[in-house]
Amino acid sequence: MPGAPFFRFTEKVISGIAMLLDLREKVRSSKPIKYTLITLISIPFVLFGIGSYFSGGAYPTVAEINGQEIDQRQLDRAYQQQRQQMAQMFGGQLPEAFDNDSMLRQQALQQLVTQQVLEGEVVEQNFAVGDETLGRAIRNMPGFQVEGRFDSEAYQNALRSSGMSVPMFEQSFRDDTAINQFRSGISSTSFILPQEAQRLAELGRQTRTIEAVSFSFADASEAIEVSEEDVTAYFDENKDNYQFPERAKIQYIELNSDDIAEQIEISDEEAEQYYEDNRASYMLSEQREASHILLDLEDSDAQDNIAALNELKERIAGGESFEDLAGELSDDVGSAELGGSLGVIAPGAMVPEFEQAVFALTEPGELSEPVTTEFGVHLIRLDSITPESGKPFDEVRDEIISTMQQNQADSEYFELREQLVEQSFDNPDSLEPASDATGLEILTSDWLDSETDSGEVLSHPQVQSAMFSDEVLQEEVNSELIDVSDRHVVVLRVTEHEGPRPKSLDDVREEVTETLKGERATEQLAELVDSALETLAAGESASSAAEGESLATVHEQVVIDRQSNLFDRGVVSRIFSLPQPDGETVTERVTLASGDQMALRLDTVAIPDPANDEEPQADEPPIPVAGVDEAGFSPRLGGTEFQALMESLRNEADVEIMDVASP
């Protein structure tokens, strides 16, 4: 899937085309002028490419980083991706606590800024991907191969079906690879001293004992009564905060490749012909099952291991069990537990030396000569052979029909998309010419606003952004083509518009009531926490701090580690950020995401001995960690160092966030 550099490249192309929008009013009334202008503009595109036109665009700039701009459309796209990714994390639906447009948009903007800083540093450090490296990488991508070899036609077809050109894909690949080289150059060269690894291991096993009392926000809020006078007074003081959002009615044309595919009929004869023409794609490669006994090179050299495996081979030939010997002697712990079995070995799944040896065996039960690889020396047994075979047509018929439908739909989609762009641009005052040219229906909406869920398309952030943009509203023209998802676009125009309208007290009575109850509950809990902190600081128990308080939950002498699920992650992180007591009382106030508030005291910090379940006393010296692997910490350290570098680069960068970046 293309990365962020590709999307930026695409946006620049769109911005270059969007520059033509400023000429609309000048060219509407005169065809000769229009054709002359377009001809003159097209000449530099042909001679010099479109790079010189990338800097302009009709979308407002939302941020500028070291002179490089991020525009509103890039932010809208990043916001939508952020929203979709978070929704997937929660099973397809964002929880209410995370469904905050302003928060998500700011997160997306910060990610774009960080990405731009990273790309600038990569260029500054002269990281680049040469033609030879690019070509070799592309030739080795399985998706561009036919029968194991690179196929130019398959390459171009795959890109075309994704709506990408070869130059766009290759530039995206260069950018992504250069960034990965830069990242890897930092992350993979990190190292850690044994003493540091020991310290990190100790910190990872550290436990902390706390005395705490928490107070329920929900219970406090529910018990609070708010009078009608209070609600009215609050509303009168905050009327400006209670308004219906601006709204609009629109006409729009929707083009979706999936809708086109559903209308395409493929006969069995056509599907069978496709099957014959692409039979190689429906072949199952030969697969083999194998087992092995591995002797690694940590305690012996290769020649000693070869001699040892030749001896094992003779013992197996003499009747001893391969499985028993593998379980007893193999250094591959995972397969040793299975009698040495590695399961199915598909081509390309193992290192070349091992794979060649497996596929050189001809009969199940046959043993190889000892084989040396980077992992050690192997004795391999062939367990079974599944020969290459073709999937029958009936098994893949539905898949073929779906593929043919999608291929035809994609071709038709891009043709219709081009017509839609051309007609909606050339006729900015109406969608009818675009509808006539494409055969797509003009749809109409009821009132739409940013607060009402009107479905995937009409509530899409980019649709909402276009609907309420100055250009579409004030100039009363068609919008740009809006990408809703992959091969799914919309063009729209506004037919009616209303600005923000004040809400009445009846509209927001319940909301105001809950706001007041929440504010008062927060104040009440803050006072309770103040009192509890005083009690805990005096050395008394959590039970004493909670005495007589129905909103309290007591947590006495609770021992937690860094993976504890007794409290939410924010509380655990806060507890482990506190300084060690060292003879002084350490207390802390914590507010949870639920609104609950907690008063806690950190009593002891300990490092358990991994060899037993007993915990040392807080004043005992650290227990050495046997066999701490410094190499295991290096990748994590490398990631930390890279993040530290990015933070430094971000702090040094000249970053300007425009007001328009806010929703």
Image: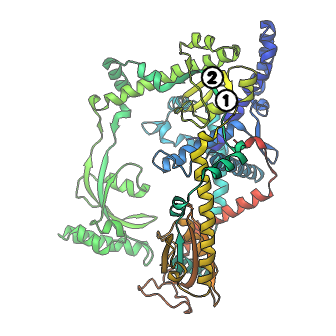
Q: Which residue is mark 1?
A: 466
User: Farthest left residue?
Assistant: 319
Q: Which residue is mark 2?
A: 492
Report whether residue 580 is seen.
no
Q: Is residue 279 left or right of residue 43?
A: left
Q: How is the image coloured?
A: rainbow
User: Is disc 2 placed on a helix, strand or loop?
Assistant: strand
Residue at screen point 34% across, 25% down: 276
Asked if labels 1 and 2 touch by Cβ distance under 8 angstroms, the answer is yes
- Quarter holding the C terminus is top right
| Mark 2 residue type | Leu
The local crowd at label 2, few if under 14, some if 14 to 19, many if 20 or more residues have their Cα within 10 Å, is many
Judge by depth and name the residue closer to the eye, 355 or 102. Answer: 102
Instruction: Give the answer, above or below, for where 501 lies relative to 363.
Output: above
Q: Is residue 472 left or right of residue 611?
A: right
User: Farthest bottom residue?
Assistant: 620
Judge by depth and name the residue closer to the eye, 625 or 301. Answer: 625
Residue 507 position within the rendered picture, expressed as x and y whole percent measured from the top left: 60, 39
Q: Earlier in the sequence, mark 2 or mark 1?
A: 1
Residue at screen point 77% across, 38% down: 61
